Structure formats: structure tokens, C-alpha cells
Amino acid sequence: MPKALCIGELLIDFVSTTVDVTLAEAPGFAKAAGGATANVAVGLAKLGVDSGFIGKIGDEPFGDFLRKTLEQNRVDTVQLISETGRRTTLAFVATRSDGAKDILFYRNPGADILLRPDEIDATYIQSAEVFHCGSCSLSHQPVRDATLRAIQYAKDGGAFISYDPNLRLVMWDAPAEAKQWIWEVMPFANVVKAAEEEWEFITDTPEMEAGSERILGTGVGLVIVTLGEHGCYYNNGSHQGYVEGFKVEVVDPLGAGDGFVAAMLTQIIDSPGGVQKLPELDDDQLQKIMRYANAAGALTTQKIGVIPALPTASDIETFLNL
């Protein structure tokens, strides 16, 4: 059984081959496997953590491509279900050099939405030490109930739960619904990673400390806000601060946050006491974890498409030693 599990969306990203143009202006797109939580599953596997992915794809060529991509990256796909007669979700992405992106989803409905609660395997989930989820799989039924059931199984099994709100308002019927369900999951999480551009929507404040204190108040042990090239902010209730980012020439910023999460989780797993000692991490340990994760995020921007760009441990070590 995998040590770490991720649940959510696995889809095809068609990423503009030119940065700083709109979707309408893009002259061409490169096909790549994507989906935030699936990216984290691959990121963990590339960093040496035995990982698995729970989700649903179409029973068609794009779904076959996605399954093969995960398997080639040593991600367990026992709980990746192919839905007969349904199509895999597609996302067209135009990126900007400042890290912002314009995304248009073809998901009406995509196979990922159709994962059902009765398809969630409690034994599989409760064997994992780490469980990662996002908010995109909360936007529609039946995958919302499937995700919530999986989170409950993970909590009951004593897993360390990582949560990335990963706000994509275009996926939701209404902004208020997105905010409601994003907060429904907060109390289950041990660590929450959010991006600067979604921070004020999620927390109702632009202030890092005030917003993170609100999240910590739900029982979360560590809150991180990624700040693009400026690094990240962290707060675990006892220690807070900023860790500078790395200056790199960005090829494709898509998925940098997913690379960050995978690297952060590996460092927490490998810290003294592992995932069970998260609240006891001192400021020096947190700084080292965030610097390592920042490096992974920077490296993920160096190629078009997230999964091909996600770094190995040796990639990160080499980068940090330059």
C-alpha cells in the first residue's frame, strides 16, 4: 500500500507554447498530464515517496495517456477508475511570466466529477500515512461526497492530511459556494498551503498573519502561503516568517505550487518525529523545509507541462548547491 495518497482531478493540460499571450492569441498548445493533486502524487513519487492517486478518468485515449503517465512515474493507479462512455476533463492554459494564468476547462461533466462515494476504498486510504487533497473535487457532485468520505477515512486512519484550497472559481457555480466548501475541509487538515492570489478570497483579509491565524484556529497545525518568485510565508502558531524565493527564468509557472507541496511534504515526513511532530518544528527546521520547497517550486517552472518539470531529490540538491 502507498505511503502517501492524493485524491482529486487528473486531466489534460493544453498549455500555451507562448508566455504572456491570451488563450485567444496563443499560437499553439503543448499537451501535458495535469491536475493539482495528481501533480503532487507524481511529485512525491519523484522525490522517493511511495504514492498513489484516487480519481476518475475517461475510458478513451486521453484517459489512457493519463494512466500511463502516472504509471511511468511510479504512482499507484489501483484506485484510478476509467469511466465508460465519459470523457477526460481538458484544461486550456495561458500563462504569464508573473505566475498568473488564464484557464478554460472543458468539463461538462468530465470523468473526474463522476467519482462516487461507494467507489472509495476505506482500507486503501486508512493504510496511508499522508493524504493530500484540494478543493477542485469539491465543486460538484458526486465527487464532492466521494472526496469528503475519503478525507474522513484518512482522518479516522490517523493520516497526516495536507490540503491545498487551489481556488479555480471557473469550476464553481458561485463564489460563495466555493468559499463554503473550502472552509468545510479546513478542520480536517494538518497543513494548508494556499497561493497569494487566492489568499484574500479564502481568508477575507490580505494580511498573512491574520488570515493564517484564522486557519490555525480551525485546528490546522501549519499554514503556508506561496508568493511566487518572492518565496513563501509560514505560520505554525509558534513560529512565523518569510523565506525568500529563487530567481529563475520562468518557462511555464503552471504547477509550481504542486512541486512546492510535494517537496514540503517529503521534508515534513523526513523531519525528526515525522508527520506526527509537526507542531514541534522549530523556526530553523521550518525555514529549511520552506527553502527546499521553494527550490522545488522554482525548478517546476523550468519546462512546459508540470509533470515533466517536477524535480527529483538530486535535482533539488544540485540546485540548492549552485
Image: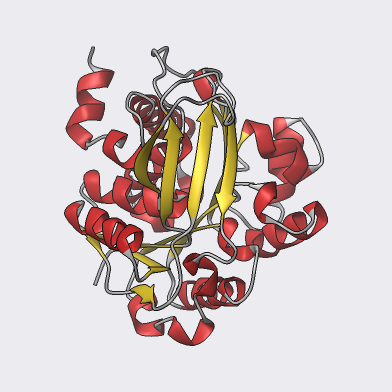
Q: Residue at x 33, y 23 (%)?
A: 302
Q: Residue at x 54, y 78 (%)?
A: 149
Percent coordinates x, y for residue 254 in the rendering: 46, 34
Q: Residue at x 48, y 31 (%)?
A: 283
Q: Is residue 222 visible?
A: no
Q: Is residue 116 visible?
A: yes
Percent coordinates x, y for residue 18 in the rendering: 45, 21
Q: Nearer the viewer, residue 289 or 68?
A: 68
Q: Nearer the viewer, residue 56 or 156?
A: 56
Percent coordinates x, y for residue 41 in the rendering: 34, 54
Q: Nearer the viewer, residue 289 or 303?
A: 303
**Image quarter in which the C terminus is found:** top left
Quarter of the image for residue 260 reads top left
Q: Residue at x 27, y 20 (%)?
A: 320
Outermost residue, bottom direction?
118
Say whether residue 318 is left or right of residue 177: left
Percent coordinates x, y for residue 280 in the rendering: 47, 47
Quarter of the image for residue 22 reads top right
Count of residue discs: 0
Q: Is residue 308 above or below residue 249?
A: below
Say whether residue 191 is left or right of residue 196: left
